[in-house]
Image (cartoon, coloured by chain):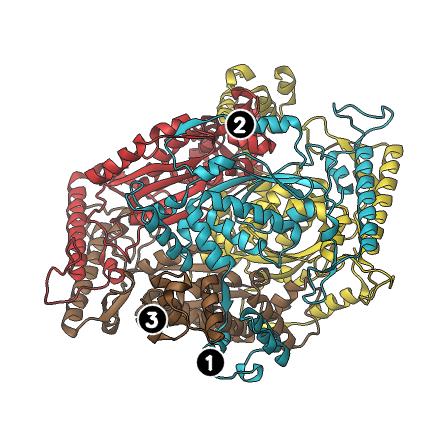
Chain colours: A cyan, B red, C brown, D yellow
Amino acid sequence: MGLNSEQLAEIEEQRAQSVPTRRAVSPGMEEILYEAIPILDHGFVRVVDYMGDDAAIVQAARVSYGRGTKTLNSDAGLVNYLLRHRHTTPFEMCEVKYHIKLPIFVARQWIRHRTANVNEYSARYSILDNEFYMPAKEHLAAQSTVNHQGRGDVLSGKDSDRVMDLLREDSERAYAGYADMLNEDADGNPVDDSRQGLARELARMNLSLNFYTQWYWKTDLHNLLHFLSLRADSHAQYEIRVYAEAMLETVKKWVPATYGAFMDYRVGGTNISKKGMGVVKRLLAGEQVDQKESGMSAREWRELMETLERPEHQKNES
Amino acid sequence: MGLNSEQLAEIEEQRAQSVPTRRAVSPGMEEILYEAIPILDHGFVRVVDYMGDDAAIVQAARVSYGRGTKTLNSDAGLVNYLLRHRHTTPFEMCEVKYHIKLPIFVARQWIRHRTANVNEYSARYSILDNEFYMPAKEHLAAQSTVNHQGRGDVLSGKDSDRVMDLLREDSERAYAGYADMLNEDADGNPVDDSRQGLARELARMNLSLNFYTQWYWKTDLHNLLHFLSLRADSHAQYEIRVYAEAMLETVKKWVPATYGAFMDYRVGGTNISKKGMGVVKRLLAGEQVDQKESGMSAREWRELMETLERPEHQKNES
Amino acid sequence: MGLNSEQLAEIEEQRAQSVPTRRAVSPGMEEILYEAIPILDHGFVRVVDYMGDDAAIVQAARVSYGRGTKTLNSDAGLVNYLLRHRHTTPFEMCEVKYHIKLPIFVARQWIRHRTANVNEYSARYSILDNEFYMPAKEHLAAQSTVNHQGRGDVLSGKDSDRVMDLLREDSERAYAGYADMLNEDADGNPVDDSRQGLARELARMNLSLNFYTQWYWKTDLHNLLHFLSLRADSHAQYEIRVYAEAMLETVKKWVPATYGAFMDYRVGGTNISKKGMGVVKRLLAGEQVDQKESGMSAREWRELMETLERPEHQKNES
Amino acid sequence: MGLNSEQLAEIEEQRAQSVPTRRAVSPGMEEILYEAIPILDHGFVRVVDYMGDDAAIVQAARVSYGRGTKTLNSDAGLVNYLLRHRHTTPFEMCEVKYHIKLPIFVARQWIRHRTANVNEYSARYSILDNEFYMPAKEHLAAQSTVNHQGRGDVLSGKDSDRVMDLLREDSERAYAGYADMLNEDADGNPVDDSRQGLARELARMNLSLNFYTQWYWKTDLHNLLHFLSLRADSHAQYEIRVYAEAMLETVKKWVPATYGAFMDYRVGGTNISKKGMGVVKRLLAGEQVDQKESGMSAREWRELMETLERPEHQKNES
């Protein structure tokens, strides 16, 4: 996952240190703190700091003076109630900071979530490593013909071989060009004394979007859950979804009560329109309904029938 | 400061607990954690959680893998450089959460800072206490005649007595009306069985703006410093400035290197316009300059001369 | 609604002016521009500027060069699709600016929505008018016993008379105290020459939360819809809901296609949890389900049965 | 600038349309509305909508009912005062929307400004054009040896030729690989019938960071000025600075009073630390000061002497 032995040693050294604190501590989070969870071929996610736990959400909701004497059980009940009724501010009272290594095209999607603090590795100051993302063959797929976005069928072996070769060659060439333009060795001396290297801020433009970058990314729990609800979703691109799924596991370790409510109400939850609820109620009352009288468009009807797992009605109507 | 013995006990209980953590710990902040710092007559500020320290800023700026082996000294130098050159994102990597009790009119100014997370005590659910702000007599002043905002001369004893009496009577009457409309005793039973109480969300409107509210307020260090630069300023209203000053002390405990740079470059710093710098350079070169040839308005000129502590030039020109 | 003849004349004068523009124009919004829509006893909402229309959403979604040749119909379909699938960024491409006059306790709820630009009338600079909110008798209700928040039964005539008298007397007294402390007449001269007035920033604290303030409030369409989905909801306090309902009408005038999709999918829409969808699917398949086997708490079950309009199941189960 | 004749026609068509509005209109902005200002080799900036003008800032600051009868002159004075004293909220009352075409590495810097609304052309849905940024030879420079970031000396002709050849070849090859993997012609049919194309969301990763993307970008005037103060600065990378400079010209057309104050106080303004002001005051009083007694670090002293244009003192001290 692109961590060299020196970096691993730094992480281990930090994990080995432990000091007393008066703050709220999440045992699950302490366990995984600083550890790099490998993602894709060279990427990772690791928690580098956090603030608060499930109890801190309850504490903020009650604007209380101490940790209180409430049971774990009633805390979980309140957390569930708050999440269900979209009382979002108490969830903003927990914070988490990640160190993430990710391909640039994934970083470009990620950064569209604006309610986070970000500090990215600067390619104006520093030289990027020769690390680029090569998809596994089973993730190379054709354009989806259903939703005009995302992937459809996996490519045949021959077709995916061609893609793999092309991606690898072009990536290697891009880095070679980058290095050539920089004309710097590991100590910052010219490789070729007879010429000047190009400024880093310019040379980087030769790299392709599958090269890895990294950043510190910090956000509150409410905005993290919003991010995860979009990016751990089946419509999200595979390469960002795997990050979201790993982060979801860190949420489970950190704030288990919140995680439970989130999986039930957000990730597994469904939004049904007013027209859609009208259809559901009539169906529950034993009536027959078809698309035309529903007032819904063919596409909306099909989406509703999928949600209700009534595929035979899809076929009839669309 | 409006803390009863039960609340003080809860705070003490929380302070007494200590568990090991792998996270960055700020010794200065641990020392004051949970303690209520008294502000005004019934208010307080207390730190209820924090994330990060001076080293965490450096760590984020470097997107590093460990705490690093750099000396404290070089960390302070980098923090100073980052603050001086407005590299703000590393300062966003530290977070702090306060519990604050404050008069409603102060809360109304405070909330205009939007880049924070807030959870306020709800007067729709709960009943507010009978606590209102009474200024000390030495803080009762007339409207400033200089800047059309803020305070000028302190009132005479007779005038301030009148104000104090009026404020106290009206506040007491406001709370009596609130309590009468609620018609609830401490156990939630009617005081007068023969009539219905008014909903809390309505009754609260009888309270005046000097009554106290409280909230959990959480923000990152960069935005906290921005808040403090405005609210610890001499132009800020006294009643919010005392909160800002107390919080500034918590910053000093938490991140001393950042605090030092902040006091030098922000709180003590001065912004001089292009025209103003033209004047400064000419003065340094030994030239004479007056307002007319400076291109500045009379007011701008006066402000510049104040900044440069050349009051005699103010008088001549404005 | 607290507009004097001079203000009405200023509004009329502005409405009478019209100049050509190359920008997108919403005919419905032009019609109501600047007009004050009366809310409560002294409040109002008025649109003072706007940017974009339904077509601008489509234009942004397509990152297009012109207004395009697409039909109105297909624009509405795309707007519906974008809203349904929570593609929120195109809705951020429209902006609206309101001038609002509202009681302070309503302003305190309102300001918790942070993704807006606000400029409030300053009671540090200026003197507030003698205008306070008096609820209509039919809106005076007891605390709800169901949800521990909000209102239940309307008060009896005798009880509401008492509240009305008390609110009016206390409000009048609060303003009298404010005016006395200020000791300023309409021209800024002392009413009583023998004493000094108190600074405005201090005197204001004697006013109660039902006094009116006003502000300019500007936000994008996406965040406006989020605000309206919370504040036009039946659980919102009546006094803010009436503002939200009036603003919903301005949205209908401004961007009718967005309004239609919003009413169907957000205002009328329902979120059902994963467990809840399990129940719905089993019911649709003709199975019997009760609370225990659903995995839901009694409260969650009751909420689901309300949503599905199966009240008889509520009684049986909870 | 990468606009084909169809796009130019769409722009011209939109410019030709004009309808009456009651809203505030900025004559300078109307003049340039929709026009693409060419930037770099294929990029552009064009204003596609705006809200408000200089008078709208004043109007919001006064929370006024009409446009008012104040003179243009006093409006400019108030705008200058507001900007000088960092009363930022009135500037948030103006809004502007740009359509921008820019290289991806520039977009990556740009997007770090979070207080804006963005809708980017989606390379998951659509195919990117074969357009990549080639710097002019005079902008190819070596890494700066002074500030460890940014550019120093311009490359020699031979060295820059080598860079140009390399950049062009690699970019062309990257696009060829992208097209090969997509295997789609302009009508969406396979180029080579015997194989499947790769999904767009994957194929795009072969493109390098100098390829062009485009987006709609909308922000308020306050945040725009903040963006411009950082990106029109001499320390900003040339490729983003040219965009900022062009946008600065649109600000001049739009809100001339704000532009004037901004150029004087922000762009041309200088922040001097408390220690620095101590030095300035002593110098103005005719005293001699050197670095050691100033309490400043060598680097801070050098920066101050540069600011005061006293280069001889730099040499002596650092």
Chain containing mark 2:
A
Chain containing mark 3:
C
| Left or right relative to D33: residue D296 | left
Disc 1 versus disc 2: nearer the observer: 1
Task: Report if residue C13 is visible in the image.
Answer: no
Real-space Cα separation, disc 3 to disc 1, in angstroms:
18 Å
Question: Residue at horizontal 50%, vertical 51%?
Answer: A225
Instruction: Relative to C3, say whether D128 is above or below.
Output: above
Instruction: Relative to B140, say whether D90 is above or below.
Output: below
- Amino acid type at circle 2 is Gln
| Left or right relative to D132: residue C196 | left
Real-space Cα separation, disc 3 to disc 2, in angstroms:
54 Å
Question: Residue at horizontal 40%, vertical 26%?
Answer: B27
Give the residue number, with chain letter if any, for mark 2.
Answer: A14
Q: Where is residue A12 in the image (x, y as percent from the top left)?
A: 56, 27
Q: Label 3: few (<14), some or many (≥20) within 10 Å?
A: some
Give the residue number, with chain letter if any, for mark 3.
Answer: C314
Q: Label 2: few (<14), some or many (≥20) within 10 Å?
A: many
- Amino acid type at circle 3 is Gln
Q: Mark 1: which secondary structure?
A: helix
Say whether disc 1 or disc 2 marks the residue closer to the N-terminus. 2
Give the residue number, with chain letter if any, for mark 1.
Answer: A282
Q: Position of residue B3 (x, y in %)?
A: 22, 39
Image quadrant in which you'd find residue B259: top left
Chain containing mark 1:
A
Real-space Cα separation, disc 1 to disc 2, in angstroms:
60 Å
Quarter of the picture containing the C terminus of chain C is bottom left
Along the viewing direction, whichever of A244 and B46 lies nearer the viewer: A244
Q: Where is residue D127 in the image (x, y as percent from the top left)?
A: 76, 59
Q: Mark 3: which secondary structure?
A: helix
